[in-house]
Amino acid sequence: MAHMPIGKGYPDHDWDRKGQLPTPPKPVTIQTLFPNFDRWAIGFDPLLETLKAISSESKLASYPPYNIFKTKDNYVLEIAAAGFAKEDIKISVKELTLTVEGSALPSVDNYVHKGIASRDFKQDFCLAEYVVVDGAEMKDGMLRILLRQELPEEKKPKVIEIS
């Protein structure tokens, strides 16, 4: 089979770039998620500004690792906190921000090898308007923070009877 030049029926493949690295994906921003949001959404300015502030302040913190899962109206935030005692962890809520902080003192000074992280951490989580913290428990190195969505009666769906 004869070699056909690029652009003559063959797509531009990665191997055609001769040593060039692939272009990294562009970061996801509020503008890329919701282009022209202000053209069709009325009255959402405060929400949009809040989302912009959150996304600009977000960090790529990976320590400690955590999971968030949801049941019907409840959420559970699980944080891997091996090596921390419950006395080493502080959980606070201010306005719509849940903050989890941990400070652990090293238990041994003369490690031969230290592969388990035990550094201080601080993680902030943005809460929706009606999400409240129900409690927290520490078991087997996992910190579980229980959250519940608590809608006021006036915000719950209503059935309107036709007269």
Image (cartoon, rainbow, N blue to C red):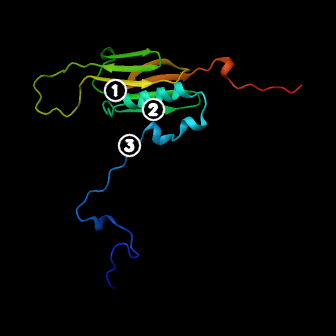
Query: Residue 107, percent across and down?
Result: 18, 21
Q: Evaluate if marks 3 and 1 touch, with contact meaning CB atoms under 8 Å apart.
A: no
Horizontally, is 45 left or right of 22 in the view?
Answer: right
Label 1 element class: loop
Residue ID at (33%, 19%):
101
Disc nearest the viewer among 1 and 2: 2
Q: Is residue 36 above or below residue 154?
A: below
Disc nearest the viewer among 3 and 2: 3
Residue ID at (74%, 25%):
158
Query: Residue 47, percent across and down?
Result: 52, 27
Q: Which residue is mark 1?
A: 141
Label 2 element class: strand
Q: Counting residues from the N terminus, which is met first, the one under dot 3 or under dot 1? A: 3
Query: Residue 136, percent across and down?
Result: 44, 19
User: Total marks drawn?
Assistant: 3
Identity, as a three-letter code, of the amino acid under mark 2: Ile
Q: CA distance from mark 3 to mark 1?
A: 34 Å
Identity, as a three-letter code, of the amino acid under mark 3: Pro
Q: Could you say which quadrant of the image residue 139 lies in?
A: top left
Judge by depth and name the residue closer to the eye, 124 or 91: 124
Label 3 element class: loop
Q: Residue furthest right?
A: 163
Q: Is residue 10 above or below residue 51?
A: below
Which quadrant of the rendered structure holds the C terminus?
Answer: top right
Q: Which residue is mark 3?
A: 27
Identity, as a three-letter code, of the amino acid under mark 1: Gly
Crowdedness of circle 2 by 10 Å Cα count: few (<14), some, many (20+)? few
Q: CA distance from mark 1 to mark 2?
A: 16 Å
Q: Which residue is mark 2?
A: 68
Q: Counting residues from the N terminus, which is met first, the one under dot 1 or under dot 2? A: 2
Q: Is residue 21 above or below residue 3?
A: above
